[in-house]
Image: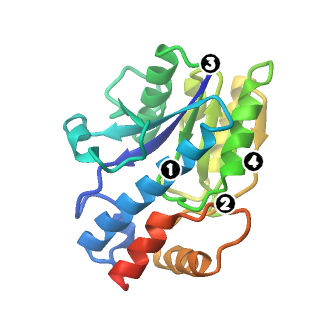
Amino acid sequence: MACAIAVMAKAPQAGRCKTRLVPPLTPDDAAGLSAAFLRDITENLRLLTESVPVAPYVAYAPAESAVLFDGMLAPGTDLILADGKIEAPDGVEGFGRCLLHAAQALFDRGFSSVCLLNSDSPTLPTSYLRRAAELLAMPGDRVVLGPAEDGGYYLIGLKRPHARVFADIAWSTDTVAAQTRARALEAGVPLTELSAWYDVDDAESLARLRGDLAEPSYFAYAAPFTAAWFDAAMV
């Protein structure tokens, strides 16, 4: 009855990841920061496994990039392909196909529930992840949504691969969470929301992250690899 939690991620390569942070970062810096994010997020998931029956994954694309994650993730993190090259209902396009691909692949492995997590929130509190897994372990179908402060979401949790929640979404806009709520309503699936958190995907949120790491709150994840990257990079 374990819940699979998969980080949606590209392998950290210069020019291919965290491109919205260039500038202020260089492509090489963005790749280094992306690697630190991935290590912290997967370490956060590893910490969660000590108290909750969850299975950590990275859902990656493209297919040939799996080897690039070697040595980069927390121990116990598995990989699963999610490049979106699957049959999908009308309206499920772009990143929605990758999300649906990841969800279907994990349900096919026998997990009772699936959470899909962004790779842009290294300080996301472990308690938010725990709450998502607990909600999905309760009886009855539901969608769990972790809204991001920019109008997107940092997490979506499912007990079945409801393709409709990924359909007709204007990805990378500030309407993603609102449209997802509407799709869940259309599908007749109850939706429960977690507390909001923030993504790090522009210069303003990058500065906010640096400040948060310098003066960490008591409930946010400490993100030690990201903090160490800032200290070493001096950006």
Eye-nearest disc, 4 or 1: 1
State the quadrant of the N terminus.
Answer: top right
| Residue 145, disc | none
Local secondary structure at mark 4: loop
- Residue 148, quarter of the rendered image: bottom right
**Residue at 56%, 19% in the rendered image:** 111
* Residue 121: % across, % down: 54, 59
User: Which residue was labeled with disc 2?
Assistant: 197
Q: Which of pointers 3 and 4 lies earlier in the amino acid sequence?
A: 3
Q: Is residue 200 visible?
A: yes
**Tag of residue 43:** 1
> Badge 3 is on which residue?
112
SS at circle 3: loop
In this rendering, position of residue 86 left or right of residue 126: left
The residue lying toward the viewer, choosing from 117 and 152, is 117
The tag earlier along the polypeptide, 1 or 3, is 1
Residue 12 position in % (x across, y down): 29, 56
Q: Is residue 29 above or below residue 101?
A: below
Residue situated in front as seen by the camera: 57 or 81: 57
Among the two numbered marks 1 and 2 on one chain, the one whose residue lies closer to the N terminus: 1
Other-residue count near label 4 (Cα within 10 Å), few / some / many at <14 / 14–19 / ≥20: some
Give the CA separation, mark 1 to mark 2: 18 Å
Q: Amino acid at mark 4?
A: Leu
| Residue that numbered label 4 is attached to | 194
Foreground mark, 3 or 4, reads 3
**Residues at circles 4 and 1 in contact by the CB criterion of under 8 Å:** no
Q: Amino acid at mark 2?
A: Trp
Q: Residues within 10 Å of mark 1 (few under 14, many from 20)?
A: many
Mark 1 and mark 2 residues within 8 Å of each other at the beta carbon: no
Q: Is residue 89 visible?
A: no
